[in-house]
Image: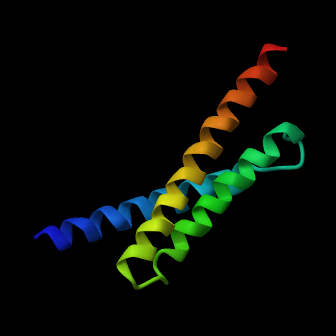
């Protein structure tokens, strides 16, 4: 039971980071402010780590890859929202 729950959580984290990266790629265009680009890249890197978690088969490294995916996705999203809010306030 616990192993199945862990697998479900692992897949949800991976798919969430991949989906977030896909959304960023869809909304990314050349007209966006350059101050947002590093945050876009961080979110996309989180999605890449999320996708690579399906390739890693050892439990401990896979956990680290998922943690990296989650950190990059959250930092990219939060940083992008913060910078966009600061850009709108100008």
Image quadrant holding the N terminus, namely: bottom left
Q: Which residue is outermost to the left?
A: 1
Residue 19 versus residue 81 in the image, above or below:
below
Q: Which residue is outermost to the top?
A: 89
Residue 47 versus residue 81 in the image, above or below:
below
Q: Which residue is outermost to the front?
A: 60
Q: Position of residue 66 (x, y in %)?
A: 46, 64
Residue 61 versus residue 82 in the image, above or below:
below
Q: Position of residue 55 (x, y in %)?
A: 49, 84
Number of callouts in the render? 0
Q: Residue drawn at (54%, 60%), measured in percent from left and top?
A: 68
Which quadrant would residue 48 be assigned to in this image?
Answer: bottom right
Q: Of 19 and 42, which appears nearest the observer?
A: 42
Left or right: residue 80 compared with residue 36: left
Q: Of 49 and 67, which appears nearest the observer?
A: 67
Image quadrant holding the C terminus, namely: top right
Q: Residue drawn at (35%, 78%), measured in percent from left and top?
A: 59
Q: Position of residue 37 (x, y in %)?
A: 81, 47
Which quadrant would residue 10 be assigned to in this image?
Answer: bottom left
Left or right: residue 65 compared with residue 43: left
Residue 67 versus residue 33 in the image, above or below:
below
Q: Position of residue 87 (x, y in %)?
A: 81, 23
Q: Of 61 and 55, which appears nearest the observer?
A: 61
Which quadrant would residue 58 be assigned to in this image?
Answer: bottom left
Q: Residue drawn at (77%, 50%), measured in percent from left and top?
A: 28
């Amino acid at each position: 039971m616990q192993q199945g729950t862990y697998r479900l959580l692992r897949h949800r984290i991976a798919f969430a980071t991949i989906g977030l990266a896909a959304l960023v790629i869809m909304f990314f265009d050349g007209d966006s402010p350059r101050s947002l680009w590093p945050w876009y890249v961080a979110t996309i890197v989180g999605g890449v780590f999320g996708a690579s978690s399906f390739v890693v088969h050892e439990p401990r490294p896979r956990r680290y890859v998922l943690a990296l995916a989650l950190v990059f996705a959250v930092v990219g999203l939060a940083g992008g929202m913060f910078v966009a809010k600061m850009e709108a306030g100008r």
